[in-house]
Amino acid sequence: GAVVSQHPSWVICKSGTSVKIECRSLDFQATTMFWYRQFPKQSLMLMATSNEGSKATYEQGVEKDKFLINHASLTLSTLTVTSAHPEDSSFYICSARREGEAFFGQGTRLTVV
Amino acid sequence: AQSVTQPDIHITVSEGASLELRCNYSYGATPYLFWYVQSPGQGLQLLLKYFSGDTLVQGIKGFEAEFKRSQSSFNLRKPSVHWSDAAEYFCAPEDSNYQLIWGAGTKLIIKP
């Protein structure tokens, strides 16, 4: 079946640094990928829709300069958390669709110290 | 606006007992409906989905769900739970833009 791979699965970084999270579709091409954020004991919050070859579409309230999304190829989207702060600590999940079904990465646990 | 409600934040069930997780949605038309499971440290996995047709859908791991239009519900059921079913379960209708609308999730706790 379709697999979406997300890397890294966890990362700890210092406040003020930037962190890049990769999302790859392993056996299919994804023109659109989605980035979610999940706070502890809460549901997923859609952050942005990543479109291959064009700018990402951000949800209301999500800072596009803070969360940089690049979808340079049909199998790779990256989310960069710039100048990370402790409040950016969260679980980030990517998703890609194939034939009407959404497939999810394993998630990335970001801890900013 | 479309919305989804999972009224139970957590449910505790004895191993071997039956399970029903509730999901109610608010949507103008009949949406596509999904149930996902999120196990600790793992990604989201699709359990089952409803697009149209038979209102009782079968999924993986012995789960099933029934779409009831009159009640705007899509409850998830399993006749006999196993300890490995302990996880967070999310109901997610899909809106007209193919975006999943996520419920708050229900945490399933299994008693030995």
Image: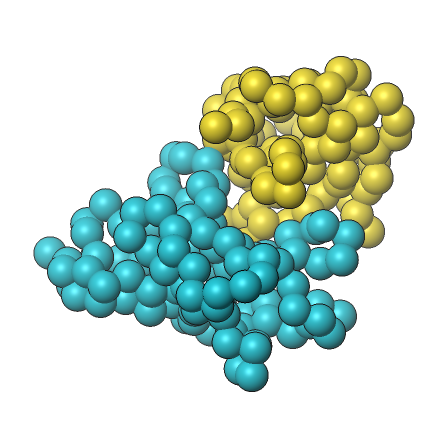
In front: B39, or B65? B65
Q: Is residue A55 left or right of residue A14?
A: right
Q: Residue at x 56, y 18 (%)?
A: A26
Number of numbered discs overlaid on the protein picture: 0
Chain identifier matching the yellow colour in the rendered picture: A
Q: Residue at x 46, y 36 (%)?
A: B43
Here the colouring is by chain
Q: Residue at x 75, y 70 (%)?
A: B1
Q: Residue most toward the bottom?
A: B70
Q: Residue most toward the right?
A: A54
* Quarter residue B39 falls in: top left
Give above or below for A85 relative to A61.
above
In the rendered picture, chain B carries what hue? cyan
* x and y, in percent, of residue B92 in the image: 56, 57
Q: Is residue A16 visible?
A: no
Q: Residue at x 23, y 64 (%)?
A: B79
Q: Is residue B75 visible?
A: yes
Q: Quadrant of the C terminus of chain B?
A: bottom left
* x and y, in percent, of residue B54 in the image: 48, 65
Give above or below for A35 relative to B109.
above
Q: Residue most toward the left?
A: B112
Q: Is residue B75 left or right of residue A70?
A: left
* x and y, in percent, of residue B9 in the image: 42, 66
* x and y, in percent, of residue A100 in the image: 64, 42
